[in-house]
Amino acid sequence: MSILRRLTAVATALALAGCSAAGARDHAAGGGPSWAPAPAPSGSASPPSAKPDRQHDGWRDSDIPAFPPAPPPEKIAPVAGGKAPYLLRIPTTQKVAFITIDDGFVKHPEAPKLIAAAHVPVTLFLTTDAVKDDPGFFKPMIEAGAVVEAHTISHPNLRGKPYAVQKHQICGSADRLAQWYGRRPVLFRPPFGNKDATTLAAVHDCGMKAAFMWKETVHKGKVRYQEGHRVQPGDIILMHFREAFVDDFLAALRAIHKAGLTPALLEDYV
């Protein structure tokens, strides 16, 4: 081999070695060249597509926030004596809140579908006069995990009423709901949140564990807070079966999600 050919070979080898060293330095520093997978050959399987975002009447699947699973529930201590406790929130530090829906006068056609699609537990405090025209409307919600509780027969203001009147409203509604849905309610909400000592005695005597008020209300898509501007752990949220059900239910879910909480089932804690 001539001297010229030997020099050319050495120069080429040095150049290649230099490129390899530079590439090694770039890789070690995280500055290697960007790359993308080559296009899939024609006819090969494509990656699975995302779940379709279905459009419904006034809402889409993507409107529903995603929540982590609720933690194992912590039962509250039972109250001794002849009266049921009256609770605005569940005394827990767990990151949970509770959705409760009252009455049943307005049977919005999207309510069963939205509750089923949300995959969250809800408690339905139903007034029997409000639902007697169509008890079956609520059965798909029960199948989706909702639990029915009592909210009187005719939705009167119980405060100040005689014991016999209050007991008839409370026990009578529980008995009728048991006939319709196969489970007798164990929780009670007085209409308007109004109660007195007689109410809590009648709740106890009707075989129920507790009566409930609330910490937040939802109406026309707006959440109203009794304290602060955020749902707190253990808070009970009140909404109703109304024309704005879709907006109200989604607003409740978003408020819980914004607070870093998960919807839990009220009955699991009582």
Image: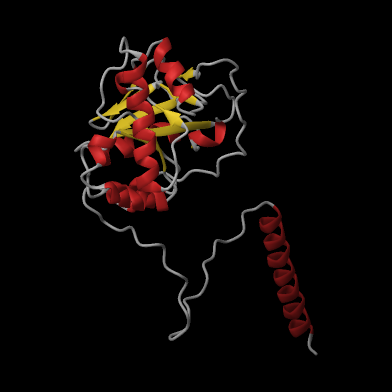
Specify the farthest residue to the front.
164
Work out whether residue 182 can be spotted. Answer: yes
Residue shown at 28% from the left, 31% from the top = 153
Residue shown at 51% from the left, 67% from the top = 36
Work out whether residue 241 can be spotted. Answer: no
Asked where in the image residue 21 lies, by quadrant, the reply is bottom right
Residue sitting nearer the eye, 113 or 3: 113
Rendered position, 29 above or below 83 = below
Q: How far across and how far down the image is residue 252, in percent? A: 36, 34
Residue shown at 50% from the left, 19% from the top = 84
Q: How far across and how far down the image is residue 158, in percent? A: 31, 17
Residue shown at 30% from the left, 13% from the top = 161
| Quadrant containing the C terminus in the rendered view | top right
Residue sitting nearer the eye, 188 or 70: 188
| Quadrant containing the N terminus in the rendered view | bottom right
Q: How far across and how far down the image is residue 231, in percent? A: 44, 25
Rendered position, 90 above or below 184 = above
Residue sitting nearer the eye, 75 or 113: 75
Rendered position, 102 above or below 83 = below
